[in-house]
Amino acid sequence: MSLQPLTGVWWKEVDPAEKVWIGLALLWCLILFAMMPLWAFTGTQNPSFETYRITNVEFQKKVEAFVEQNRVGEDRGVPVVAARPGQDVYMLGRMWSWYPVLKLKRGETYRLHLSSMDLVHGFSLFPLNLNFMVLPGYEYVLTVTPTQAGEVYAVCNEFCGIGHHQMVGKIIVE
Amino acid sequence: MDRASAFRTCVHTGLRVHLTAERLIKAHAVAGVLAILVGGVAAVLVLLTRWPAVHLLDPALYYRALTFHGINMLIFWIIFFEVAILYFAAPIVLGSRVAWPRVGWVGFGLMVLGSLLIDVAILRGGADVMFTSYVPLRAVPSFYLGWILFAVGALVGVLNFFATLVVARAERTYEGSVPLVTFGALTAAIIALVTLAHGAIIYIPTWLWSLGVIQNLDAGMYRLVWWGLGHPSQQINVSAMVAVWYLLATLTVGATPVNEKVSRWAFVLYILFINLASAHHLLVDPQVSPAWKIWNTSYGMYLAVLASMIHGMTVPASVEVAQRRHGLNKGLFEWLTKAPWGNAGFAAFFLSLVLFGFMGGITGVTFGAEQVNIISHNTLRIPGHFHATVVAGTTLAFMGLTYYVVPLIWRRRILWPRLATFQAYAFGIGVAIFAAGMTTAGSYAIPRRHWDVQFTAAAFQPPVEAAAHVFLGVMGLGGLLAAVGGALYVLITVASVLFGPRIPDEPGAFRLAPVPPARGHTPISGTLVLVLVFLAAFVVYYFLNWKWLAAIWLVK
């Protein structure tokens, strides 16, 4: 029993049913492992590794320049920015908003730059369910291609203080 | 008191019990039950706020209650109980004295002091920073100091365990190799050592930062090192829980491990690989590379998952063998259908095994795949997963063990044994419903740690699918059932310790399942069928998630 010390020769032959299971489990584990590199090379959804160190001031400057050049309107006090296909687009997270509102085209590819001005934020496209982390001091570049038209929302899904639940931004896909 | 008189022999198990070990177990268990009591009150408040139909607390109190709930449950309840298990697994199982009795009490004192500092900091509003306290979110210095003291105290308990193993060996209190339960506890202790070291490495600079001594801490570095504490501390739970499964299998049906070599190798795989899993939390972070993510999130080619899948067979197989040797030999499943389902210890143990595997294990491995994490990270899928592992799995197993700790350590009968059985089912099934509702709501992108999924106060109000609300309701109802089970656990345990009839030191006064005599080869075909069903469920859920992933925007 599991409470008794073992004496003598206790490393016995493994039961055939156990051998079958260990073999199957090992095979499944290797399949689980293979799926990730396989998807990294052939799949269309992979976490980006284009990432740069940046200061708040530098990032904010880039975002302001982007907004100034491409601004097309305003939605509830937040500038709406229309981007040309293939363009670099920016979204800045801070307590407790995403800035600006982006207007993208379905089927076109954009380089989406994300960073935070203060705390750690979560960039979650709602209700699409696409989630990335946004850290202060890091500029994270996701190369995204929207596949459905309509409005999606950037919900913060990492706790960032008392107003965390108010932090919702918007992306319009035409 | 001289050393000889400091022992008693347990008439029910034949174990030689060092009274200091017994007192240390009692102290840690009491602290653990207090933590689950206060953490449980916070759990109900959090539940009733996240359930949109109720939406009880205001935002400040909700985030405070959530921080309080996470730390009291995941750290205080679990680690106090685990240190108690260590004081059982070395001194009592091996019939040895505790190596350093006084040091043991110092460790306990540090853990109590640390937990009080943390709880006071949270309740006074100085640490609304969640369980993870990601910098640059800032709490009062006493919060971080509390973590350091608690971690050092737990580390002292772990070192006392190692020292006791050395003493037992040197004083020859046993012959041969240590029993499997001790081996499993040793696995948990080794993982704990690595985990708590990470805790010290990250909380010491964070404490200095909160005092203004250090000016700047990198958010990415913090997340990397913090999860060296945060995730492996859950792997202490896994190892300790598996050791408790083997123990409860012995206590409830007289089970003997089918093959010691296999079970021990599986524990060794935990030691070698399971700590890599801190990567699970960084899969959609900017600071680490895909190669790093893939290797680490897979625990080095999933060899720690292999270990859990092995235990997932060998534990029920040991029950099957014991039951068949007791004469329940008909067909594939008589051993299971005629198992002692009315025994609270067995019910808790077997439910814990099934729920941990089918719900916690499958979801954890799936969400931990690098790319699938894109559709899981920080949504309700994540707490849905870990409530299935650490609550339906670990906590339920520890509850089952409590129904043996009270009679064997306190030597008091459990008052209301039938209520205890009901408690195990209510808690297990409640958490299962809760976690299923939560995980499914999360697949509609409902965020975790969020006060208002209606987004009423936000600049924009994203539409929430009606189905998501249905599953949040399922979560609420399951959570209430679990809360009833949790409250009954505290009530039964405290009442039995205080008012349970004393069990006399006479053979037969407390009945443990007899260990059936070994004979020939006993088939484990029923267990093989069960694990094949498990594998089928795993394969289906895993590939469904890749299908869901392929339906979102393209991203690289």
Image: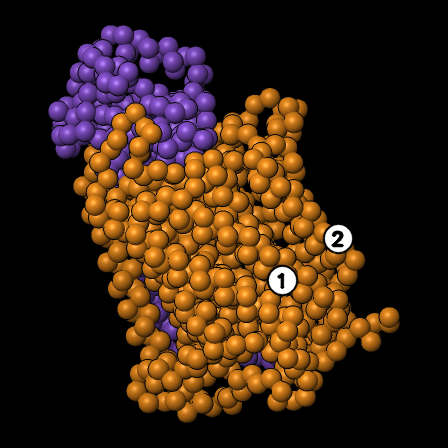
Chain colours: A purple, B orange
Name the residue type under label 1.
Ala
The image shows residue A30, relative to residue B264, as above or below, that is above
Label 1, on which residue? B29
The quadrant in which residue A59 appears is top left
Q: Residues within 10 Å of mark 2 (few under 14, many from 20)?
A: some
Counting from the top left corner in percent of width and height, residue B511 is at: 57, 85
Of residue B354 and residue B470, the one placed in the foreground of this image is B470
Q: Quadrant of the N terminus of chain A?
A: bottom right
The quadrant in which residue B62 appears is top left
Name the residue type under label 2.
Val
Q: Quadrant of the C terminus of chain A?
A: top left
Counting from the top left corner in percent of width and height, residue B43 is at: 46, 51
Nearest to viewer (mark 2 / mark 1): 1
Mark 2 vs 1, N-terminal side: 1
Are callouts 2 and 1 both on one chain?
A: yes
The image shows residue B269, relative to residue B401, as above or below, that is above
Looking at the image, which residue is at 38% across and 73% down? A18
The quadrant in which residue A141 appears is top left
Counting from the top left corner in percent of width and height, residue B345 is at: 49, 74
Q: Secondary structure at mark 2?
A: helix
Query: Is residue B534 left or right of B84 when viewed as pictured?
Result: left
The image shows residue B75, relative to residue B352, as above or below, that is above
Looking at the image, which residue is at 63% across and 68% down? B89
Query: Is residue B14 left or right of A76 when viewed as pictured?
Result: right
Q: Note whether residue B152 is visible.
A: no
Q: Secondary structure at mark 1?
A: helix
Q: Residues within 10 Å of mark 1 (few under 14, many from 20)?
A: many
Q: Which chain contains the residue that carries disc 2?
A: B
Of residue B353 and residue B401, the one placed in the foreground of this image is B401
Looking at the image, which residue is at 39% across and 89% down? B328
